[in-house]
Amino acid sequence: MAEWFSHDVDITIPNAARAYDYALGGFHNFDVDRKFVEEAARAWPDVIELAHANREYLGRVVRWLVDAGVRQFLDLGSGIPTLGNVHEVAHEAAPAARVAYVDIDPVAVAHGRRIMGDDPRVVTVRADLRDPESIVSHPEILGILDFAEPVAVLMVAVLHFVEEDHNPPRIIRQFSDALVSGSFLAISHGVPAVEDAAGQAAVSRMYRRTPTAFRARPVEQIATWLDDWDVMSPGIVPVNLWRPEQEEHDGRPVDAVGAVARKQAARD
């Protein structure tokens, strides 16, 4: 069996992390995941473009954060490592940058640990982002991240898998409480489709067959989660329009928005 395979993996139902890996052209997925993505793409052709747009957005965000002086990254719902991982992008410009990856999926964690090896600047932890305290107090994470210094928390393409019962704004607040002023939060989140609402709705129904239901939320709702943060320019925008680096983008907004925000200084 492949080294990235874990004995507690259920290969009878599709998994969001493995499906995302396949959509990005990765190889750490199973037949059930591939069939899921192919069915989703037939229902909503934009789904593959959206996966790539989110990944490209993540790379631009990390480069921007490094330029802003960030040297510590906490990547939540990091998924299965593929090209353009956070530590790879960060280390291009800041070799001393430290990165903690967190995911609940055993395949993502097993593969992450395998490819990171014994790099002292990187750690991969299996944990649930819905329990922020367990993450910010995790010994392996505290071994490389110093929460007395600014940290960039990355929640890219993950909060739309968090149900209302688990209260996404509460999750953000609890992570914020662990951060010092000058730390950053980067998010991306699916929004209601403009051109193909029926296709997006079909994919949302498909995700109900998985452990992680997908929920697109209005931009206005997502914006309220950042009320206590300073949102950096260009604001909350479609992910492919957030500081694009390539002119070949046609400018058609994808159905996911992103933003980078800085934690405000404490008020007296």
Image (cartoon, helix red, strand yellow):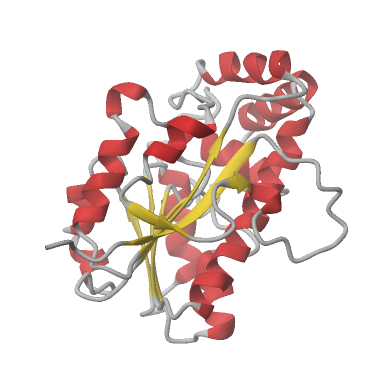
| In the foreground, 142 or 237 | 237
Q: Position of residue 188 (x, y in %)?
A: 53, 45
Q: Residue at x 52, y 23 (%)?
A: 13
Residue placed farthest to the left in the image?
268
Count up the numbered dots: 0
User: Which quadrant would residue 50 be assigned to in this image?
Assistant: top right
Q: In the picture provided, is 171 more to the left or to the right than 105?
A: left
Q: In the picture provided, is 240 more to the left or to the right than 226?
A: right
Q: Position of residue 178 (x, y in %)?
A: 20, 59
Q: Is residue 90 above or below residue 49?
A: below
Q: Position of residue 242 (x, y in %)?
A: 64, 55
Q: Residue at x 59, y 17 (%)?
A: 206
Residue 128 shows in this picture = no
Q: Is residue 165 above or below residue 157?
A: above
Residue 73 shows in this picture = yes
Q: In the picture provided, is 31 more to the left or to the right than 232?
A: right
| In the foreground, 236 or 77 | 236
User: Which quadrant would residue 261 be assigned to in this image?
Assistant: bottom left
Q: In the picture provided, is 191 more to the left or to the right than 230?
A: right
User: Which quadrant would residue 7 be assigned to in this image?
Assistant: top left
Q: Position of residue 264 (x, y in %)?
A: 29, 62
| In the foreground, 258 or 18 | 258
Q: Residue at x 45, y 29 (%)?
A: 10
| In the foreground, 186 or 221 | 221
Residue placed farthest to the front in the image?
268
